[in-house]
Amino acid sequence: MLAMKLLPLATLASCLLILPPANAAGRKPNVLFIALDDLNDWIGCLGGHPLTKTPNLDRFAASGVLFRNAYCAAPSCNPSRTAVFTGLPPHRSGLYQNTQKLRDVLPDQELLPRYLSRQGYWSAGSGKLLHYVIDPQSWDDYYPDKAKDNPFPPTFNPPNRPISLALGGPWQYRETDWAALEMSDEEFGGDWRVTEWIGKQLQQPRDKPFFLACGIYRPHEPWFVPAKYFEPFPLESIRPGPGFKENDLDDVPAEGKRIARNRYFPHILEHKQWERGIQAYLASIHYADAMVGRVLDELERSPHRDNTIVVLWSDHGWHLGEKEHWQKFTPWRLSGRVPLILRVPEGVPGLPEGTRPGSVCDRPVSLVDLFRTLTDLCGLPPKADAGNRSLVPLLRDPAAEWPHAAITHLDHPENYAISTESWRYIHYRDGGEELYDLAADPHEWTNLAGKPEHAAKLAEMRKLAPGTIAPVRKTRITTQ
């Protein structure tokens, strides 16, 4: 009798020993999708500026895979974000410019959150994720209210603008301005409200997996953030970024010079605001980093900590005087290269072993690859018309063979840059070209396109251009 009673207990114990872990392969993982706006490589783990302070971004990079050679699909908000959320690069979608409207160009395209919702996910977001719209039909929930289609929560806006940089004329973007604000994060609102809402969602138990997207607006202009974020950057310590070099446009083709010289940098120099602008950008990055830290801390405290993929990216970079340019919109690395970090827990269907903390990948990757990467990781069918490149092989082994280049398109289909691991090629619509050896010249100071000894490499890079390039799709005129 005793043996008969013990047998079921022994059997039960053996069954318990072989039960899979909570997030075993086959269970759909959650996705936390964090986007920052206008952030170049000025973060500690990318070494972009020696003064920058980004402890939260750096600790996150140390917990996952840091892609040091990641590029946006376009160096402007609308086409870059559209590429991420559709899986379509500009040369396939025809959306190249901020002035095009997503739903005018792609009226029936299914975006990432809706695609995941159809696969059983709860998809929610907050803050700027698309270009100044929410696209309400793509989300199950949103803050602010998705019905209003305005992604920006209440944010303090100083009166009596501009504060620091005088308006130079109708060509100037009014938000090109900066100041330290004597107020708390909560009083400032904006990204604090976004991260507060995201944190609350993370603490909720869920009966289905979630896709939770957090759009942090800084360091997008205006560079108004609470004063405490300026304090680590005293004005007398400010220096240009390491990519700055005088007369750097001397060997750049005419179209490149035209793109670079957009009047902002001379205007900023004239008003003696260069150092203050750099200071304010560093302060805005420091603030954005603090907001990232709030979200990561909430995830660590949440019931979803061990079953959540975390992806962090920026839509494009930013110039602060390099190539005589201020803003984005250029073909060079400062506009196109972006922070990209992924952390995958153990047990997800597409990568059961998870990512190794502190991994670094130098293969050339594109943000447009994130759509397919997430469907692969989550064990979902790929979206039929999305790009077919997945970063999963590189998440498994950052040194894996990767025969791909990353392509970044400007506002015209024939203005584009191609990035490999060690080289960059820039093509302009007037036939002008640039070629850079990144191993010897990471800041793209010396154009090798006209050097006979590099003719073979130039020809090799030309062959990496897309075979078919869509024209700019027609759209209604917008002032945004």
Image (cartoon, grey):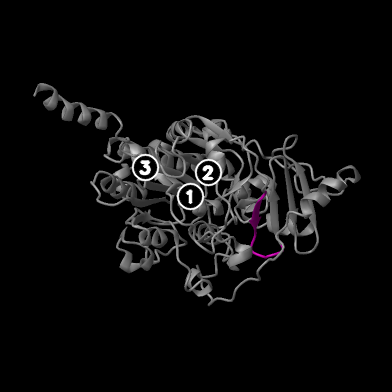
At 68% from the left and 46% from the top, the residue drawn is 403
* Number of numbered markers: 3
Mark 2 surroundings within 10 Å by alpha-carbon count, few (fewer than 14), some (14 through 19), many (20 or more): some
Q: Is residue 258 magenta?
A: no
Q: Earlier in the sequence, mark 2 or mark 3?
A: 3
- Look at the numbered discs 1 and 3 and tell me whether their residues touch, using CB distance below 8 Å: no
Front position in the image: 177 or 357: 357
Mark 3 surroundings within 10 Å by alpha-carbon count, few (fewer than 14), some (14 through 19), many (20 or more): many
At 42% from the left and 34% from the top, the residue drawn is 56
The span shown in magenta is 405-414
At 53% from the left and 43% from the top, the residue drawn is 392
Q: How far across and down, in percent of the image, does residue 472 sit?
A: 63, 71
> Callout 1, which amino acid?
Asp
- Please give the residue where the numbered disc 2 appears in the rendered image: 392
Query: In what element is the residue under mark 1?
Result: helix
Mark 1 to mark 3: distance in Å?
Answer: 15 Å
Q: Is residue 81 above or below residue 398?
A: below
Q: Specify the quadrant that holds the N terminus.
A: top left
Mark 2 to mark 3: distance in Å?
Answer: 16 Å
Q: How far across and down, in percent of the image, does residue 55 sit?
A: 44, 31
Query: In what element is the residue under mark 3?
Result: strand
Q: Which mark is residue 308?
A: 3
Q: Nearer the viewer, mark 1 or mark 3?
A: 1
Q: Main secondary structure of the magenta part?
A: loop
Q: Nearer the viewer, mark 2 or mark 3?
A: 2
- Look at the numbered discs 2 and 1 and tell me whether their residues touch, using CB distance below 8 Å: yes
Does residue 72 appear to the left or right of 432 in the view shown? left
Query: In what element is the residue under mark 2?
Result: helix
Q: Which mark is residue 376?
A: 1
Q: Earlier in the sequence, mark 1 or mark 3?
A: 3
